[in-house]
Amino acid sequence: QVQLAESGGGLVQAGGSLRLSCAASGRAFSSYFMGWFRQAPGKEREHVAAIGRSPDSTYYADSVKGRFIISRDNAKNTIYLQMNNLKPEDTAVYYCALMTAPHVGGNWGQGTQVTVSS
């Protein structure tokens, strides 16, 4: 069972940046497809980014394309989400997940809160 733990959330002003981290357990991390999701109050969970076994294999939702960058460090069993030019509408709890199917995640972490003030 893969366990995930997110960190790096916080409060930032609009236009600012944050980098989220997700540490994973398990010896087969390099073979995992990983992703980031977010859920704002009263809204459904949204898939924002994913990364395949190759660091060049990435997906971004239109809402974050050009502003967010997903990456991975297999030596550290960690994925990252660099978030730039943050907007108030990016405010949400961000979760990393093991991708079990396109746009479908599992083995959820506990989430990390990101709040963007205007």
Image (cartoon, rainbow, N blue to C red):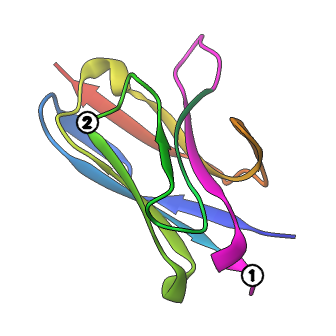
In what element is the residue under mark 1? loop
Could you tell me which quadrant the N terminus lies in?
bottom right
Residue 8 in view here: no
Q: Residues within 10 Å of mark 2 (few under 14, many from 20)?
A: few
In what element is the residue under mark 2? loop
**Residue 83, placed above or below residue 107:** above
Q: Position of residue 16 (x, y in %)?
A: 14, 40
Residue 95 in view here: yes
- Which residue lies at the image location 53% right of the left edge and 81% below the top edge? 74
Find disc 2 in the rendering and name its residue.
66
Question: To which quarter of the image does residue 46 belong?
Answer: top right
Left or right: residue 82 compared with residue 53: left
Which residue type carries mark 2? Gly
Left or right: residue 23 compared with residue 58: right
Left or right: residue 24 compared with residue 6: right
**Residue 27, placed above or below residue 41:** below
Q: Position of residue 23 (x, y in %)?
A: 56, 71
Residue 36 on the magenta segment: yes
Q: Position of residue 108 (x, y in %)?
A: 73, 50
Provide the residue span drawn in magenta. Answer: 27-45
Whether residues under marks 2 and 1 lie with C-beta atoms below 8 angstroms apart, the answer is no
Find disc 1 in the rendering and name its residue.
28
In depth, the one of 23 and 113 nearer the eye is 23
Question: To which quarter of the image does residue 62 belong?
Answer: top left
- Which residue lies at the image location 24% right of the left edge and 24% below the top edge? 87
Left or right: residue 118 compared with residue 24: left
**Residue 107, placed above or below residue 31:** above
- Which residue lies at the image location 46% right of the left edge and 66% below the top edge? 55
Residue 29 on the magenta segment: yes
Which residue type carries mark 1? Ala
In depth, the one of 57 and 95 nearer the eye is 57
- Which residue lies at the image location 79% right of the left edge and 69% below the top edge? 2
